[in-house]
Amino acid sequence: MTDDVKNVQPQLDELISINEAAELSGLSISLIRRLVGDGRIWGKKIGRNWVTTEAAIRDYMALERKPGRKPKKR
């Protein structure tokens, strides 16, 4: 995990599916999966399903993001 994600284990009743996270945020399921995989949103795989928390999604949505292409790193 990166420094962007808090290393806190949530309670079971706080967990939501990636599908619920997509509905809550308005982001696509594939983007949420990518963000979890990149460590930008907290997530955990339980069995074959990925879960996250509403708080993790809200924290990510509160970040200031610039849409569009990103400059190439040299």
Image (tube, rainbow, N blue to C red):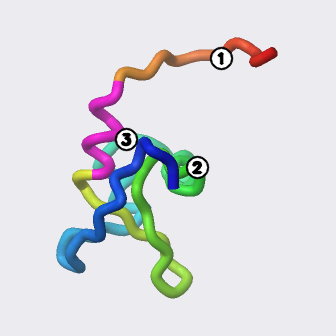
Magenta stretch: give its range: 56-63
Report helix, strand or loop for mark 3.
loop
Q: Position of residue 26 (x, y in %)?
A: 37, 41
The correct choice, above or below, for 17 with respect to 62 in the image is below
Q: Which mark is residue 29?
A: none
The correct choice, above or below, for 20 with respect to 26 in the image is below
Q: Position of residue 27 (x, y in %)?
A: 44, 42
Q: Is residue 23 left or right of residue 28?
A: left
Q: Amino acid at mark 3?
A: Gly
Q: Earlier in the sequence, mark 3 or mark 2?
A: 3
Dividing the picture into quarters, in which one does residue 60 lie? Answer: top left
Q: Circle 3 sits on which residue? A: 26
Q: Circle 1 sits on which residue? A: 70
Q: Circle 2 sits on which residue? A: 38
The correct choice, above or below, for 27 with respect to 52 in the image is above
Q: Dot 1, crowdedness within 10 Å: few (<14), some or many (≥20)?
A: few
Extreme bottom residue here? 47
Mark 3–mark 1 Cα distance, whole angstroms, equals: 22 Å
Residue at the image point whose x is 50% and y is 48% from the top: 2
Mark 3–mark 2 Cα distance, whole angstroms, equals: 19 Å
Say which of 35 and 68 sits in front: 35
Q: Dot 3, crowdedness within 10 Å: few (<14), some or many (≥20)?
A: few
Report helix, strand or loop for mark 1.
loop
